[in-house]
Amino acid sequence: MTGERIGVATCAEHPRTDEEQELTTAALVNAGLIPTSVIWNDPNVQWDDFDLVVVRTTWDYTEHHQEFVEWVTSIERIENPAPILTWNADKRYLLDLEAGGIPVTPSTIVDSPDELVVPDSARFVVKPTVGAGARGVERFDVGDVTAAKAHIAELLGLGREVLVQPYLEMVETEREIGLLFVDGRFTHAIEKQPLLNAKKEDRTAYLMSGLVTLREASDDERRLAAEALHVAMDHCGVTDPILYARVDLLPSESGPVVVELELAEPSMYFELNPAAADELAAAVARRSAR
């Protein structure tokens, strides 16, 4: 029994226990650790009381982005590492991945509605660069320029920066895949139904429902996901394998492309592969004992 104290960071919006959290907590306890769920921006938490802080369900950071960045960089021992967390909290990272040779969903930053250039696709997506769970994400037909500009203006008015991407139609038939990694090792892959097909008010429940299932990942998908993680680590100056990661890929005419690189607070879907929770706990034990 190691007995290291682990702060498992969550948020005020999601303090409840779900199946993934239960599996994670049980695995940490079985690994001889003492986990405590703590709200990341609770001013009463003494972070120095923990041997290691593990970021998990800090899903409201998108509403408190600068505060989150300041918090992450204030913790001496945090996983994933602070450079990874701060970089990954803004979807501008897609441009860094692309510059590193990783195929991504084509992404353009728009600073005003008048800068909108409609992608060469039947439909396109407008989203905030800082966002999670499809909040603020809208899909438009190629002719809906007025509505798209209005959405861009709304996001900018809320202080958000805006990303425009083509909607890759192949996702309707071949689906989005998420590849999960623990301590740098691929553990399992999941398939997600097209989230933007759900009504805005239903998307959170849709994401949490049984419409996420296990699937096999092809060699090309595994290779791309591993390369994306390598580029991310290199960009952030991180050399050790990162504790957890989910790489979300979309199908395209030229092969799979990265649509999201989830290194801050991804759902890991341990309920579909409980052994991966044990691997995470073992990796946490190794890190906390250093």
Image: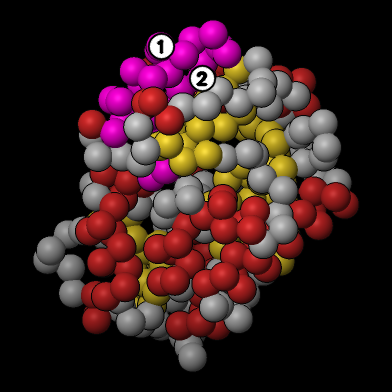
SS label for mark 2: strand
| Residue carrying label 2 | 139
Q: Residue furthest front?
A: 114
Q: Where is residue 163 drawn, in percent x and y?
A: 47, 37
Residue type at mark 2 is: Arg
User: Comparing marks 1 and 2, which lies closer to the viewer?
Assistant: 1
**In this picture, which residue range is highlighted in magenta?**
128-156
Q: Residues within 10 Å of mark 1 (few under 14, many from 20)?
A: few
Q: Are marks 1 and 2 in contact (CB under 8 Å)?
A: no
Q: Quadrant of residue 113?
A: top left
| Residue carrying label 1 | 146
Q: Residue at x 72, y 48 (%)?
A: 103
Q: Residue furthest bottom?
A: 290
Q: Where is residue 171 drawn, in percent x and y?
A: 71, 26
Q: Nearer the viewer, residue 160 or 83?
A: 160
Q: Residues within 10 Å of mark 2 (few under 14, many from 20)?
A: some
Residue 134 shows in the view: no
Residue type at mark 1 is: Thr
Q: Residue at x 42, y 51 (%)?
A: 90
Q: CA distance from mark 1 to mark 2?
A: 13 Å
Q: Residue furthest left?
A: 44
SS label for mark 1: helix
Residue 287 shows in the view: yes
Q: Quadrant of residue 68?
A: bottom left
Left or right: 235 as drawn, with respect to 57: right
Q: Residue at x 55, y 23 (%)?
A: 118
